[in-house]
Image (cartoon, rainbow, N blue to C red):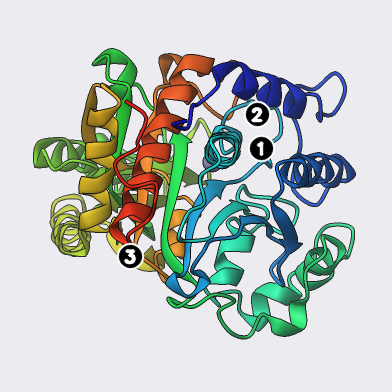
Amino acid sequence: MSPRIDPERIARRIEALSGFTEPGRPWTRTAFSPLYADARQWLQAEMRSLGLSTEIDAGGNLIGTLPGQRNELGALGLGSHIDTVPDGGRFDGIAGVIAALEVAQAIKDAGLHLQHPLAIFDFLAEEPNRFGLSCVGSRAIAGELSAEMLQVASPEGETLAEGIARMGGDPRELDRPLLSPAHMRAFMELHIEQGIRLESEQDDVGIVTGIVGISRAEITFSGRADHSGTTPMNRRQDALVAAAQFVAAVEERAGKSGEDGHVATVGKMQVFPNAANAVPGRVVLTLEVRALGMDTVNAFFAWVESMVAKLEAERGVRGSIVPLSSGAPVAMDESLRLRLAKAAADAGLAMQEMPSGGGHDTAFMARICPVGMIFIPCREGRSHCPEEWSSTDQIARGARTLLNAVLALDGEAGGSAAGRGEA
Ligand SMILES: [Zn+2]
């Protein structure tokens, strides 16, 4: 019997998880909350009912494992996260965990015994939470939760280390990676796209090429605050006009690049003194640049320096650029990309390659093992809101892609499941 993805089962589990929400505020299940703990207990029980062994690792991740015939091969990992942002949706992260569970059940029900262990991950706290840090569990796996991060306190005074311990983890072990390449053959995540490309181009699956790197800088334009009624137009050092020119130039420059995944945004701005009758004397803004290549990011910031210098000369203001953060892009493993594309083609699905403009747990799993990621469509690209929606069939098509990829990867190790992918 070849393994079958059951859309009804997917729908039932999505529905069940959506019940764990703050009443009157759908859908709110923030990490570290009692509701989140309840939802994880439900998930753990589902895993156990399929015969998966479960554990909470030191980073507070819930991991369910179907044993393999040859554990020395390392696990094939699947998964995502079940926490939500406040007033969030029922699919962001959740679809990836439920699809992973469905793959495990399809394999189990078909009586297949994989060569590799199959590990289903529910990463702790992927979304920003009361500790102000995202991807907590996957960072822990990669050994990238610093001692400083672990001591960050919530508004209630609990430290992140205490929060992780409360979720069943062990912060004393977080000074090193929790998994090594020997543990993991590969990791693959299904996630809703959170954009409109797949829906508008009527594709079933997006094969993710890479997760963009995100760099941010604070840029200040200083001019001179003056009386708006008495300072002639030609004698002003208006910081806001310089900033406005800068914002427009950023949009034009990023828009012209044509590079997939490359965007730039000024999303935050403060004006001083911010009064109707004052020429703005100072403007502080935040520039964020995302791209799949660090070269692109570096080239953009080199252009920013020249642009700021040009505005200084033209408008009689002073500019300063202070880097805030810089996260490197993460490329998906080339052979897993091809494997996932073939898996989707074998399932008869329409697909395209695309970058991920948002961050995901997969970016941290990439420190441990080869990683791949697929997107499924979501209605109108809406996400992090109650309107977030993917249909059961859309999730099932993604799950079929994952299933085919798992069977093919296992087949490479001489697995009995070789060539038995669901078409
Ligand atoms: Zn997510």
Question: How far across and how far down the image is residue 114, in percent?
Answer: 48, 54
Q: Residue 58 lies in what quarter of the image? A: bottom right
Counting the numbered discs, the total is 3
Determine contact: label 2, label 1, CB under 8 Å.
yes
Identify the residue under disc 1: 85
Q: Residue 22 lies in what quarter of the image? A: top right
Foreground residue among 226 and 387: 387
Judged from the image, the secondary structure of the residue bearing numbered disc 2 is loop
Q: Examine the rendered structure and indicate whether residue 343 appears above or below residue 120.
A: above
Task: Identify the mark nearer the N-term, 2 or 3.
Answer: 2
Circle 2 Cα neighbour tier, 10 Å, few/some/many (<14 / 14–19 / ≥20): many
Q: Which amino acid is tagged 2?
A: Gly
Task: Give the CA distance from mark 3 to mark 1.
Answer: 24 Å
At x 48%, y 24%, the residue is 395
Identify the residue under disc 2: 88
Identify the residue under disc 3: 328
Question: How far across and how far down the image is residue 143, in percent?
Answer: 55, 77
Question: How far across and how far down the image is residue 146, in percent?
Answer: 61, 79
Question: How far across and how far down the image is residue 116, in percent?
Answer: 47, 61
At x 76%, y 84%, the residue is 172
Q: Examine the rendered structure and indicate whether residue 207 appears above or below residue 124.
A: above
